[in-house]
Image (tube, rainbow, N blue to C red):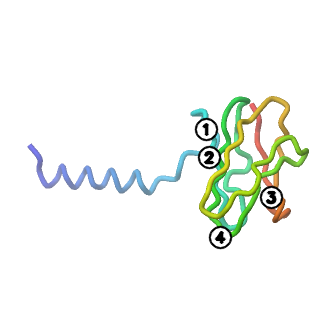
Amino acid sequence: MLTRRTVLKGGAAILAASLMPSAPASAHNGMVHIRIKGFAFDHDPATVKPGETLEFSNEDAVPHTATAADGSWDTGLIAPGTKAFVVFGAGFGTDYFCRFHPNMKASLAAE
């Protein structure tokens, strides 16, 4: 039987879940999510395994890139409100930056 108490408990659980921080970038599900917001990459370092996909989502109002410091990979331009994807490979560099904003730096912890 659906009671007011049951409904309130369910609503509280949904609210609590929505307020929880998103899963860390090291959560291995084949996709590592990295947000670009406030002229920064949100996980530093992000843990990644070869074969996993890095998803960069640009939440700023200007374009960015995610570019390996050693030049081994590059997302190309990531327009505001869009995403770019890179499949991380063995031998890829782990330090990266934005070509448009070189002070934006982060790294990957490769497993």
Name the residue that disc number 3 marks.
Answer: 98
* Callout 3 amino acid: Cys
The residue pinned by badge 4 equals 61
* Relative to 64, residue 2 above or below: above
Going by the numbered disc 2, the residue's amino acid type is His
The answer to whether the residues at label 4 and label 2 have Cβ atoms under 8 Å apart is no
**Mark sitting earlier along the chain (3/4):** 4
How packed mark 1 is, by other alpha carbons closer than 10 Å (few <14, some 14-19, many 20 or more), is some
Give the Cα separation between the discs numbered 3 and 4. Answer: 14 Å
Q: Is residue 53 above or below residue 44?
A: above
Give the residue at the far left of this rendering.
Answer: 1
Between 34 and 6, the one nearer to me in the picture: 34
Residue at image mark 2? 33
- Do labels 3 and 4 touch, CB within 8 Å? no
Q: Which residue is mark 1?
A: 31
Q: Which residue is rendered at x = 73% and y = 50% of the image?
A: 44
Q: Earlier in the sequence, mark 3 or mark 2?
A: 2
Spatial CA span between label 4 and label 2? 19 Å
Secondary-structure class at tag 3: loop
Amino acid type, label 1: Met
Closer to the N terminus: mark 3 or mark 1?
Answer: 1
Q: Residue at x 67, y 59 (%)?
A: 36
